[in-house]
Image (cartoon, rainbow, N blue to C red):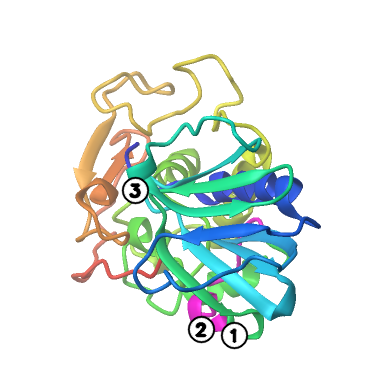
Amino acid sequence: MDGMPEGDVVYRTAARLHQGLAGRRIVASDLRHPRLALVDLSGRTVLEAVPRGKHLLIRTTDGLTLHSHLKMDGNWWLYRPGQRWRAPSHQVRVVLTTDDVVAVGSRLHDLEIVRTAEESSLVGHLGPDLLGPDWDPDEAVRRLLASPERPIGLALLDQRNLAGIGNLYRAEVLFLRGVHPSTPTAAVPDLPGLMSLSHRLLYANRERVEQSTTGSLVRGQERYVYGRRGRPCRRCGGPVAAESLGSGAEGTDAERTVYFCPRCQPLTSNDTTTPDNGAGAR
């Protein structure tokens, strides 16, 4: 995967966990992290599993929340008791066992246990969630314009502006709007329209594994530019480009790679940017 799971992936993961765990009593828990090794969630009932941008929150009775972040390789699986796990044991970080369901979290990151009332200490910095009840396109635009000279390709990945967009949707929404990733945010035509399109794309994909931005679910035809370096643009036929932008708002080399069509997304002479360190919260 070229980048982290996007907001729609976390949304589906949370929905799957909620369906399997909500209302069930934890009979055994195993938190495989040195800081949490002595924490025992057994005896508590899972109230809900909810996404917040790219973060996942499992809330239990007694006002506790288990927080995790999938980053690039994390996942949650649901099994029947006694069923063989898909993930190797050494990659497992969390096991929550109920009478009829076992939730196994593998290669999870940023594991924390906090009081539910204090979740904001972990996710309060995030901007409006594209798939959450707090989605507010006007607030997202306001946050984006707080750094008007920042390249839009970096601003969209900064989860403090809006939560849920990753490398895939960044590339696809900018292509569909004809905007070069290096365009200063303030120079982007119709930022509200860009927010509306971002919301529609994630919403359309929230309940299916296939992340399609073209409308096609045929393998190899799901995207316009993402992951298609050097292949013909679906609009003009020119080669799709892939370049680095800033230092990576998500903190890895993969996240710095932005895909675009130089012909369909031209960078005009007026589109100049100031240096950007790429810092962006998850």
Query: Which comes sooner in the sequence, label 3 or label 2?
Result: 2
Q: Is residue 16 visible?
A: yes
User: What are the residue bounds of the magenta stretch?
Assistant: 120-131
Q: Position of residue 142 (x, y in %)?
A: 54, 76
CB under 8 Å between callouts 1 and 2? yes
Residue at screen point 37% across, 37% down: 88
- Residue 83 placed where, x, y %? 58, 31
Which label belongs to residue 121? Answer: 2
Quarter placement of the C terminus: bottom left
The residue under label 3 is 180
Look at discs 1 and 3 and give the one toward the viewer. 1
Tag count = 3
Three-letter code for the amino acid on which mark 2 is drawn: Ser
Verify whether residue 129 appears in magenta: yes
> Would you name the residue on which mark 1 appears?
118
Q: Secondary structure at mark 1?
A: helix
The image quarter in which residue 57 lies: bottom right
Answer with left or right where residue 10 lies relative to residue 43: left
Residue 55 visible in the displayed image: no
Tell me the distance, in whole angstroms, between the alpha carbons under discs 3 and 2: 35 Å
Q: Residue at x 56, y 50 (%)?
A: 10
Q: Secondary structure at mark 2?
A: helix
Which element is circle 3 on?
Answer: loop
Question: Residue 78: horizontal and vertical position, in percent?
Answer: 61, 40
Between the residue at mark 1 and the residue at mark 3, the CA separation in whole angstroms equals 39 Å
Q: On the picture, is 59 further left or further right than 111?
A: right
Dot 1 crowding, Cα within 10 Å, few <14, some 14–19, many 20+: few
